[in-house]
Image: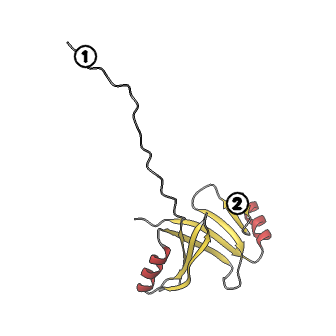
Amino acid sequence: MPHPFVHIELATDDVPRAKSFYAELFGWKMTDLPMDYTLLSTGRAPGGGLFKRPPEAPVGWSVYVGVTDAAATLEKARRLGATVLRERTLISPEFGHFAVLQDPTGAVLCLHEAPRMPARKKARRIARRPARKARRR
């Protein structure tokens, strides 16, 4: 199963300045969310975002790879020599979970686990056709 890049985001100390800069430079559209996060619409996938950098994070861009199970992916990464920088963490029920690892070469990579969709009940289709009368010849 492929694991594509699904999201790119900027952690910054000056959100208003970053928003202004990238809107002017590239024409990106911005949508502010109530959770102090700004979605970036670049016109193509993957999507992006920017937010106020927490004290433990460096200023800079991060790239996210889509995975079905962030916890299992972290365990596999550990076995392969990675260091886990952030365990599987809930973003929100609508946006799923993320995690951060550092590969054996020192590069940092983020994981994104999309929220699970509720299972749909299989709709039973009942054909309501009138019974055909048998023809006699």
Residue at screen point 49% across, 74% down: 70
Place of residue 32 in the rendered image (x, y in percent of width and height, measured from the top left)? 74, 62
Place of residue 22 in the rendered image (x, y in percent of width and height, measured from the top left)? 73, 64
Q: Quadrant of residue 15?
A: bottom right
Task: Give the labeled residue for mark 1.
Answer: 135
Residue at screen point 67% across, 82% down: 58
Say the numbered circle drawn on residue 26: 2
Q: What residue occupies the far left of the structure in this picture?
A: 137
Q: Is residue 12 above or below residue 6?
A: below
Place of residue 130 in the rendered image (x, y in percent of width and height, measured from the top left)? 38, 25
* Pick the front one: 44 or 118: 118
Residue at screen point 47% across, 68% down: 68
* Pick the front one: 4 or 115: 115
Is residue 67 toward the left or the right of residue 51 in the image?
Answer: left
Of marks 1 and 2, the one in the foreground: 1
Q: Is residue 137 above or below residue 117?
A: above
Q: Quadrant of residue 27?
A: bottom right
